[in-house]
Image: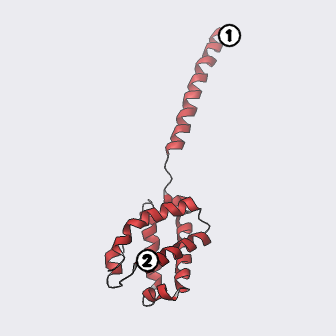
Amino acid sequence: MVSLMKFKIQIKPMIVVIFFALLSSCATQKITLFKQLGGDAGVSNIVDNFIEEISFNPKIYAFFKDSDIERFREKLNQHLCFVTGDSCEYTGDSMIQVHAGMNISEKDFNITVELLINAMNKAQIAQPLQNKLLARLAPMRKEMIYR
C-alpha cells in the first residue's frame, strides 16, 4: 500500500506540469488577424461590403467605373489575406502600379478609408480588429495618393 501511495504522489506533480505545459502552449499560439476577421468568409464579407460602399459613392466610384470588379474582388481578397498574416500569396500588381495615373487626393483616400470602415461595421468586425487591419494597410497610403 505504501508503494501505491508513493506512485500517486509522484504522478500528481507530473500531471500538474503537463497541464501547465499544455496551457502555456495554447496561450502562446498566435491566431492571425485573418482568422480573427473570420477567415475567408469574413474577409470576403468585408470586400463585398466595401465594393457595395464604393458603388454608392459617386466620387469614389469614378476611380473604379472602368475596373473589372470581379478581378478587383479577387485581388482585394488575396491582398487582405496576405496582409493579415495568412499563408496567401498576393499575385496582383503593386499598389504603385494599381494606382498610377489616378491622382488620388488625400481627401479621396480618407473617404475610401471611411468606406472600408463602413464595410467592416456592416460585417460586424469589432473595433480593435478594424484598427489592426487599418494599421496594416496604413503604410501603403504613400503608394496610393498623388500617383
Quick one: which residue is furthest to the front in this view?
107
Q: Which residue is mark 1?
A: 1
Q: Quadrant of residue 88?
A: bottom left
Mark number, residue 51: none
Quick one: which residue is furthest to the top in this view?
2
* Residue at x-position 35% and y-position 84%: 103
| Label 2: element kind | helix
Classed neighbour count for the residue bearing mark 2: other residues with Cα under 10 Å, few (<14), some (14–19), many (≥20): some
Q: Is residue 90 visible?
A: no
Q: Quadrant of residue 52?
A: bottom right
Residue 15 percent coordinates (x, y): 59, 28
On screen, residue 25 above or below 36: above
Q: Quadrant of residue 91?
A: bottom left
**Which callout, 2 or 1, points to the residue nearer the camera?**
2
Mark number, residue 109: 2
Between 144 and 97, the one lying in front of the other is 144
* Residue at x-position 34% and y-position 71%: 142
| Label 1: element kind | loop
On screen, residue 21 above or below 52: above
